[in-house]
Amino acid sequence: YMFDFAQWQKTIAPLPHVSVLDLYPCYAATVAKDQKPLSAYFWKNDGHHNAAGYRMMAHCLAQYLLAQHPEWPAYKNLP
């Protein structure tokens, strides 16, 4: 599944303090590293994240936030 963020980026980019984060590259890296199928991170019935998927999302968001704000000490202990 690939979502086209072009329209979102045109709409949101001019807004101050708002970002759009494409999680796909981080998801692809996590799936490759864990050697699990992408389906292991989503419910089969509706395609929403399961517990493993939300863990992956949280990890990807934390990596992004740490890269943007290295001064934030709460993210220093990431695996």
Image (cartoon, helix red, strand yellow):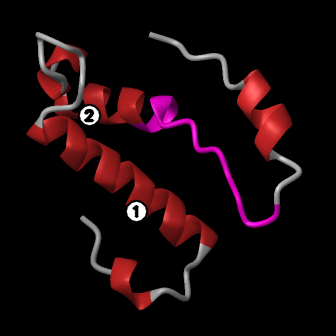
Q: Give the total number of marks visible in the rendering.
A: 2
- Is residue 64 part of the magenta span, yes or no? no
What is the C-alpha distance between the residues marked 1 and 2?
Answer: 17 Å
Q: Which label sits in the foreground, 1 or 2?
A: 1
**Residue shown at 13% from the left, 33% from the top:** 50
Q: Main secondary structure of the magenta part?
A: loop
Q: Is residue 11 left or right of residue 55?
A: right
Instruction: Locate the N terminus and report the quarter of the image it occupies.
Output: top left
Q: Which residue is mark 1?
A: 62
Please rate how many residues cluster around mark 1, counting C-alpha atoms within 10 Å: few if below 14, some from 14 to 19, many from 20: some
The one nearer the camera, 17 or 61, is 17
Q: Mark 2 = which residue?
A: 33
Q: Are marks 1 and 2 in contact (CB under 8 Å)?
A: no
On screen, 47 above or below 51? above
The residue under the point 18% across, 27% down is 41
Left or right: 44 in relation to 63? left
* Secondary element at tag 1: helix
In this picture, which residue range is highlighted in magenta?
16-26
Whole-percent x, y for residue 32 in the image: 29, 26
Residue occupying image coordinates x 43% and y 55%? 61
**Element at label 2:** helix
